[in-house]
Image (tube, helix red, strand yellow):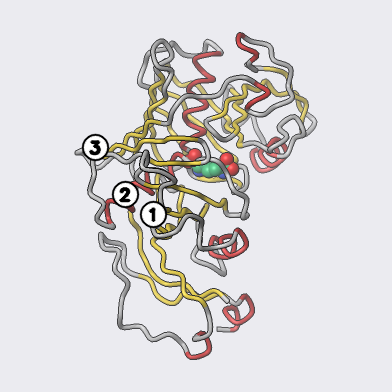
Amino acid sequence: MMRLAQTSFALLMSQSFGLTNSSPKHLRIPSTLKASRLVEFSKYEGLGNDFILVDDRDKEAPSLTPEESEKLCDRNFGIGGDGVIFALKPPSDDYDFAMRIYNSDGSEPEMCGNGIRCFAQFLKDLGADAESYQVNTLAGRIIPVMNDDTTITVDMGEPELIGANVPTTLDPNFEGDSVVEQNLECNGKTWKVSAVSMGNPHAVIFVDDLEKDIDFESDGPALEACPEFPAKTNVEFVQVLSDNHLKMKVWERGAGPTLACGTGTCALVIAAIRAGKIPAGNKVRVTLPGGDLFIEWNSDTDNKVFMTGPATFCFSGKAALK
Ligand SMILES: N[C@@H](CCC[C@H](N)C(=O)O)C(=O)O
């Protein structure tokens, strides 16, 4: 209780790991917290990339501030999560819903791949029982499709490959003003970086051995904040295991090390194809710390990227915020 008072945050109740979203009715709110604002939430994860989901479908903007979201994401004093995701009213009849997200540090990214699968599962659990959803995001239209085997395939749209639009100030060195394995000096080392945006920026780096070739805790944050990526960047370190199997570790912008990154996984498959590390046209398995995602890039046709993976309900509850 000391800690709760100190941080003006309290998690009041939580529901078991199971398949229901309903909040338990039997817990009493402590009288000291009665003046607090109660936030109803549900917790989901996609390969261990975990999110606090808030049902704001009657609103046009998130009901929590970036600062409040940061507090809720705290793993010691809050609920814990890599971000807070808001299900919002669509901006027009062209869409079913809108999604916004704050990272665990309160910054706002344009998109989140694992997050949009959690978002779709959240909507399904709330009763919006469609096969697919047209979702408006800051990265444009994203379309999650619910599969019969409980996985979710997401039409992630087209990647942005023009370096300046990623954005990066690294000199373009590849077709279409793109940046493929370009030299970057950072943290006392020279890296070969490929820049890809999936709505949000990614710096992809291929290494021979993920365990030996990087100092993850030091190189990750240094690259995230390097000036050549003026909006900061997510950083993916990648090892090629075969023509259709890659392994990666991610340092996320605004969240640090996470167990998985969906947009990052799409970005690294595109980077691997463009750098000639793997052939085009395969469905590529990517092994992340939290499990596997499957990526397909229609580079010869509509240029769209498709990501398939799980999204799982963990628990729901109410949190008090002053
Ligand atoms: N984990 C996400 C990406 C979340 C946003 C990212 N941290 C950023 O700031 O761009 C994913 O699964 O894509």
Q: In the structure shown, which secondary structural element does the residue marked by tag 1 occupy?
A: strand
The kind of residue tagged 2 is: Gln
Residue beneath label 3, please?
147
Q: Nearer the viewer, mark 1 or mark 2?
A: 2
Mark 2 and mark 1 in contact (Cβ < 8 Å)?
Answer: yes
Percent position of residue 272, x then y: 52, 18
Residue beneath label 2, please?
121
Residue beneath label 1, please?
44
Residue at the spot 44% in from the left edge and 77% down from the top edge: 12
| Crowd tier of the residue under label 3, counting other residues whose Cα lies within 10 Å: few below 14, some 14–19, many 20 or above | some
The kind of residue tagged 3 is: Asn
Numbered disc total: 3
Separation of residues labelled 1 and 3 (CA atoms): 18 Å
Residue at the spot 68% in from the left edge and 11% down from the top edge: 173
Q: Earlier in the sequence, mark 1 or mark 2?
A: 1
Above-or-below relation of 290 to 66: above
| Crowd tier of the residue under label 2, counting other residues whose Cα lies within 10 Å: few below 14, some 14–19, many 20 or above | many
Q: Is residue 252 left or right of residue 241?
A: right
